[in-house]
Image (tube, helix red, strand yellow):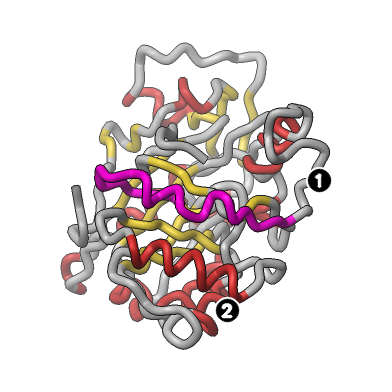
């Protein structure tokens, strides 16, 4: 938790809940679990000697956003999932009470458990204009399962974070019409999987189908650990190592596009330029 963060699309993080469990392939190399190993070895943190699957609620952190007077975009539970089944309903209610008392902030809540979110928001807890609800999606299966209950839930903004993006995804026309924001990002960390530019382009283009009157704000967050060689012309200052690279030979899975080669350069060096451009769009709703 902190008033500063390196996450591109928020100003601060707030973790009244910590700990989580894996439920899909996007969780395989979870960044929070990776950070957890370091934090749990530090006796000065609330993670000390805890396992990642130890989900806990922290009442002493509930009022933290109320101490921040300057308006912020706050990522809720960067180290957990607010709608995890181990989080009691009464605690979720208290989290929403705090968010209602801080209308100057925009609370960005991301979940892989939209069914529980759908059951609670609007019935047990209020739907708030300053609470943006989103789902994390990595492939077509999770898109088909998670986007519909998200769209069916009342929120100030509906968004999808395709991170880590692990394959080609077709967003249905109806769902695109209902989305307010789309984020795309590749995987980071020592065991990260590469992301093909064609997957990113496809989502970008689906967000900009003006002939269908669809223009969804699109934010490309990062390539992640691996940088695609085909993007090198957009970043000629980047030195590509030849000693660690991987290729994707199965072009049939990408609608007969050319095979791609990636170089491991690290998240910072890989950057977030797609086809020579930085896509840094945000919803008009509540924009700073």
Q: What stretch is highlighted in magenta?
A: 55-75
Nearer the N terminus, badge 1 or badge 2? 1
Q: Is mark 1 on a helix, strand or loop?
A: loop
For disc 1, the marked residue is: 51
Q: What element carries label 2?
A: helix
Residue 247 colored in magenta in the image: no
Q: State the image quarter where residue 45 is shown.
A: top right
Is there any visible trace of residue 253 in the rendered image? yes
- On the image, the x and y values in percent for residue 238 come to 42, 15
| 10 Å crowding of disc 1: few (<14), some (14-19), many (20+) | some
- On the image, the x and y values in percent for residue 31 come to 63, 40
- On the image, the x and y values in percent for residue 42 come to 74, 27
Q: Is residue 10 rendered to the left or right of residue 216?
A: right
Query: 154 above or below 107?
Result: below
The residue sitting at 35% across, 40% down in the picture is: 11
The numbered dot on residue 83 is none
Query: 207 above or below 125?
Result: above
The residue sitting at 65% across, 37% down in the picture is: 192
Query: 136 above or below 241?
Result: below
Residue 57 colored in magenta in the image: yes
The residue sitting at 62% across, 53% down in the picture is: 58
Is there any visible trace of residue 165 in the rendered image? no
Q: Nearer the viewer, residue 171 or 148?
A: 148
For disc 2, the marked residue is: 115
The residue sitting at 58% across, 56% down in the picture is: 253
């Amino acid at each position: 938790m902190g008033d500063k963060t390196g996450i591109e699309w928020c100003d601060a993080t707030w973790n009244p809940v910590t700990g989580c469990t894996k439920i899909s392939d996007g969780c395989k190399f979870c960044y929070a679990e990776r950070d957890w190993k370091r934090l749990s070895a530090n006796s000065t943190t609330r993670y000390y000697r805890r396992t990642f699957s130890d989900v806990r609620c922290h009442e002493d952190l509930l009022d933290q956003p109320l101490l921040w007077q300057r308006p912020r975009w706050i990522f809720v539970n960067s180290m957990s999932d607010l709608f995890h089944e181990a989080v009691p309903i009464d605690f979720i209610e208290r989290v929403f009470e705090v968010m209602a008392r801080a209308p100057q902030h925009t609370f960005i809540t991301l979940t892989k458990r939209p069914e529980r979110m759908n059951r609670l928001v609007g019935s047990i807890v209020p739907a708030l204009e300053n609470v943006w609800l989103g789902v994390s999606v990595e492939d077509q299966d999770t898109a088909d399962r998670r986007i519909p209950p998200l769209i069916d839930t009342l929120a100030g903004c509906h968004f999808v974070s395709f991170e880590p993006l692990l394959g080609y995804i077709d967003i249905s026309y109806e769902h695109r019409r209902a989305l307010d924001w789309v984020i795309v990002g590749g995987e980071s960390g020592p065991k990260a999987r590469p992301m093909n530019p064609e997957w990113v382009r496809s989502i970008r283009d689906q967000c900009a189908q003006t002939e269908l009157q669809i223009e969804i704000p699109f934010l490309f967050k990062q390539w992640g650990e691996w940088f695609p060689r085909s993007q090198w012309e957009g970043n000629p200052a980047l030195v590509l190592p030849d000693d660690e690279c991987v290729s994707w030979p199965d072009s049939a899975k990408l609608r007969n596009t050319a095979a791609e080669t990636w170089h491991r350069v690290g998240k910072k060096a890989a950057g977030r330029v797609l086809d020579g451009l930085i896509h840094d769009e945000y919803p008009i709703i509540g924009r700073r």
